[in-house]
Image (cartoon, grey):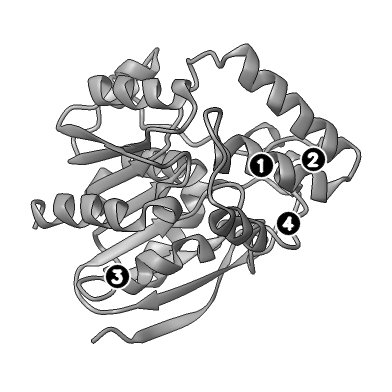
């Protein structure tokens, strides 16, 4: 029987992060997408906490966590959470932006991650289609106009529906609920964290005094068992990137979730949960 063990805030550089912990067992840390907050994982926490100690948190600037215009690193914030909770090692699961944070964290601190699950991860060195760029331009226009309702509508269209169909109204309504009060501060026209004076970009440690020269080399250094998840209704670019990641990352496997776009954990939670739990059971 799972039970909540802790919740609260931890101090990080210039801010506080909200977190909660549910269940007992080996730790499993969840990192949410750019568009929502840790409530994205409600269904997963309910299921995963029956076997694991599930930790989730609001990334800086989302949900109940603060955001200030100062140099910071999402990887450093996640490390602070690990240390605050005494997690010497954990399973790590991230979706979209959370997948990219999880990948960078694992590359920088591989000894802290026993196995990695990423859903809807992107590659920097990949070119998106004209159709996607047009939709993104509409989103950026809504942000520039401080039209947050329009921005939320565009997020639903791009990421919840995807390019191929319209998601169920229940999923669309739930994601709108998760985005209530979202000001899209990360998309405002001020310098991003790594470009601020004194900021240190998230990166892997040097290899023989020289950093890897490509994403293939960087991700090829990953030795942690990795599960790559993607919805079959997501953007074709996103599905293609999952295949490229599977090629780049040693000891990885890919699972395509039918009937889901960018949020398979919301659209097809049973298939998503089953894929994650099956993978983690083989890493014990």
User: Residue 188, which numbered label?
Assistant: 2
Q: Which residue is mark 3?
A: 47
Q: CA distance from mark 1 to mark 2?
A: 16 Å
Q: Residue 274: which quarter of the image?
A: bottom left
Label 4 vs label 2, nearer the camera: 4
Quadrant (top left/top right/bottom left/bottom right) for the C terminus = bottom left
Asked which secondary structure carries label 1, the reply is helix
Contact flag, marks 3 and 4 (Cβ < 8 Å): no
Q: Which mark sits nearer the N-terminus, 3 or 2?
A: 3
Q: CA distance from mark 4 to mark 2?
A: 12 Å
Q: Is residue 109 visible?
A: no
Residue at (29% x, 74% y) in the render = 49
Q: Position of residue 260 (x, y in %)?
A: 42, 42
Q: Which mark sits nearer the N-terminus, 1 or 2?
A: 1
Q: Which residue is mark 1?
A: 155
Asked which secondary structure carries label 4, the reply is loop
Q: Position of residue 171 (x, y in %)?
A: 54, 55
Residue at (26% x, 67% y) in the render = 27
Contact flag, marks 1 and 3 (Cβ < 8 Å): no
Residue at (48% x, 15% y) in the render = 126
Q: CA distance from mark 3 to mark 2?
A: 36 Å
Q: Is residue 156 visible?
A: yes
Q: Position of residue 243 (x, y in %)?
A: 30, 22
Q: Is residue 95 left or right of residue 127?
A: left
User: Residue 182, which numbered label?
Assistant: 4
């Amino acid at each position: 029987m799972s039970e909540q063990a802790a919740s609260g805030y931890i101090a990080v550089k210039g801010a506080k992060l909200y977190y909660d912990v549910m269940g007992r067992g080996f730790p499993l840390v969840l990192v949410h997408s750019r568009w929502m907050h840790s409530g994205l994982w409600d269904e997963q926490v309910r299921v995963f906490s029956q076997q694991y100690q599930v930790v989730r948190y609001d990334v800086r600037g989302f949900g109940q966590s603060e955001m200030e215009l100062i140099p910071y690193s999402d990887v450093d914030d996640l490390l602070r959470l690990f240390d605050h909770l005494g997690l010497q090692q954990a399973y790590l699961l991230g979706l979209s932006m959370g997948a990219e944070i999880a990948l960078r964290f694992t590359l920088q601190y591989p000894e802290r991650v026993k196995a990695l699950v990423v859903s809807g991860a992107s590659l920097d060195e990949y070119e998106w289609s004209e159709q996607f760029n047009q939709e993104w331009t509409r989103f950026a226009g809504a942000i520039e106009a401080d039209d947050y309702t329009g921005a939320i509508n565009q997020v639903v269209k791009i990421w919840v529906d995807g390019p191929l169909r319209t998601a169920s109204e229940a999923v669309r309504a739930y994601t709108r609920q998760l985005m209530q009060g979202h000001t899209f501060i990360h998309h405002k026209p001020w310098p991003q964290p790594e470009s601020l004076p004194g900021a240190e970009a998230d990166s892997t440690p040097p290899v023989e005094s020289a950093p890897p020269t490509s994403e293939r080399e960087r991700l090829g250094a990953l030795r942690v068992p990795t599960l790559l998840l993607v919805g079959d209704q997501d953007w074709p670019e996103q599905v293609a990137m999952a295949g490229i990641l599977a090629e780049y990352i040693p000891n990885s496997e890919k699972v395509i979730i039918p009937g889901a776009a960018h949020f398979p954990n919301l659209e097809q939670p049973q298939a998503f949960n089953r894929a994650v739990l099956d993978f983690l059971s083989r890493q014990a």
